[in-house]
Amino acid sequence: EEDNNNNQEKESSLLSTTSSFPPVILFTPPPVDGIAWSDRGNEIAKEYGNVVKEVGKELNCSVLDVFTLLEGNESVQTYGKYLRDGLHLSEDGNILLYQGLMKLLQKDYTHLLPKDDDDS
């Protein structure tokens, strides 16, 4: 808890000194398979993600909730397909993350969306 609060203070301090362009987009951590990574756990990832979301609200930053995007509230059998080794994203996890980021850009920063070759 204390580490999360210290990290939140550091993030707030860093972000309050940055300009608005390019925009800051915060990412929550992905879910974690606590069996594969005994020193980490899904509940800790979720708690830290909640801190990230609070910082985003305080600083008016967009937040990509990777934990929820990868179905972290479900069973490890569900979200495990998005993790290569219980912690790092698999190809499917990276694809879902990319899709989530594109949706966030579409919603908050359409001017930053990638352009097709046909776009001017």
Image: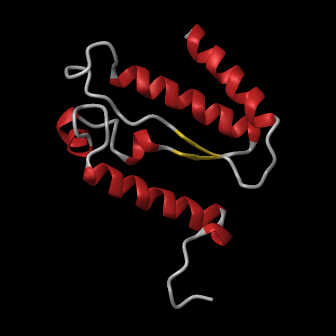
Which residue: 65% across, 23% down? 8
Horizontal relation, residue 62 to residue 117: left or right: right
Q: Is residue 56 above or below residue 99?
A: above
In the figure, residue 61 lies in which quadrant?
A: top right
* Position of residue 30 measured from the top left corner of the image (x, y, whole percent): 39, 36
Q: Residue at x 74, y 44 (%)?
A: 60
Say above or below: 29 vs 81: above
- Looking at this view, name the residue that lies furthest to the top: 2
Q: Quadrant of residue 66?
A: top left
Tell me the colour scheme of the image. Answer: secondary structure
Please state, as top left, top right, bottom left or bottom right, where the C terminus lies in the image: bottom right
Q: Residue furthest left?
A: 77
Q: How many numbered circles are shown?
A: 0
* Along the line of sight, the residue nearer the viewer: 64 or 98: 98
Taking 113 as reference, is 47 left or right? Answer: left
- Image point (20%, 23%), residue name: 36
Compared across the picture, whether 5 is left or right of 86 comes to right
> Can you say whether 96 is above or below 29 in the image?
below
Quarter that holds the N terminus: top right
Q: Is residue 83 above or below residue 95?
A: above
In the rendering, at what x and y percent does residue 91 appear?
26, 52
Q: Residue at x 60, y 36 (%)?
A: 53
When asked about the image quadrant of residue 18, the answer is top right
Tell me where residue 51 appears, x and y as whole percent. Answer: 58, 27
Seen from the viewer's position, the closer of residues 34 and 18 is 18
In the rendered view, does 75 fall on the left or right side of 120? left
Query: Where does residue 48 sit, x and y in percent of width and height?
Result: 51, 25
